[in-house]
Amino acid sequence: MSNETTTLISLKEAMKRVDHKLQALEAQFKELDFTKDNLTQKFEHHSKTLANQAAQDELWTAVLSFKFTPMELNILYSYVIEVLIRLHTHVLEKLPDLVRGLPTLASILRRKVKNKRIRVVWESVLEEHGMQEGDITALCTFFVAHGNKAEHYIAKVRQMYIKDVNFMITNMVKNQALQDGLLKAVQVIEKGKAVGAPEKQKSSLEELIPSAKS
């Protein structure tokens, strides 16, 4: 065998070894990319969880640090309970066959997580009222924090005490999520006819919303 042939064979073998090493490196890089993507997803999820928890803590702090008089608190409570019942009622109107299975707003909030039909209707009702999930979280938090001591005032009584409730909210509620939720509640109720406030809504919502101590 000539030196030229031997050199050619050695070169081919060397190229194969290099090719195998390149393939091994490529596999390692793919594994590293997968690991990086997995860690990135976990980090983003953890960051969102922490952000949500921080926002919830800020919301509870804002709700529990209210400086409203009992009368002002009752007026806000009245708007909150009326809009929550309004949303519940409108969902039932769209789901008449589920009326018995959705006796309260809390039952809707629980079941919409796994029931697509309920979820779609709930989202539709929120959109019709110009509201978002964040508004509901804020209103439910307010409800649980103050529902046990607040009283419901009908529209005529509210108007006797406070001429501009929007100004009161904007001026005294500094937490943006809570301010937005309360303003939306006032807007929705002022545009339509108010409804009653049955006590069963209170116990159901208290079971659903985490307490301020948790």
Image (cartoon, rainbow, N blue to C red):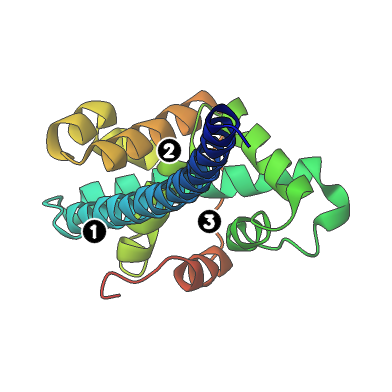
- Tell me the quarter of the image containing the N terminus: top right
Q: Determine the secondary structure under disc 1.
A: helix
Seen in the picture, residue 200 relative to 116 is either above or below; the reply is: below
Residue appearing at x 51%, y 26% in the figure: 130
Circle 3 SS class: loop
Q: Is the Cβ of the residue at disc 1 closer than 8 Å to that at disc 3? A: no
Reading the image, the residue beneath label 2 is 155
Q: Find disc 1 in the rendering and name its residue.
A: 57
Kind of element beneath mark 2: helix
Any part of residue 152 in sight: no
Residue 160: x, y in percent? 29, 35
Q: Are marks 2 and 1 in contact (CB under 8 Å)?
A: no
Which three-letter amino acid code belongs to the residue tagged 2?
Answer: Ala
Give the class, few, some or many, for how many residues have Cα within 10 Å of label 2's Cα (few <14, many ≥20): some
Q: Nearer the viewer, residue 36 or 177?
A: 36
Residue at screen point 37% across, 64% down = 144
Is residue 200 in view? yes
> If you read the primary sequence from the N terminus, does the residue marked by circle 2 or circle 1 appear first?
1
Residue 47 picture location, percent across and down:
31, 51
Task: Give how far apart the Cα atoms at labels 3 and 2 are.
Answer: 13 Å
Say which amino acid is labelled 3: Ala
The quarter in which the C terminus is drawn is: bottom left
The reply, left or right, for residue 52 in relation to residue 199 is left
- Residue 63 higher or lower than 187, as above or below: below
Looking at the image, residue 81 sits to the left or right of residue 63; the answer is right
Q: Is residue 101 left or right of residue 70?
A: right
In x, y percent, where is residue 159? 33, 33
Distance between the alpha carbons at the discs numbered 2 and 1: 32 Å
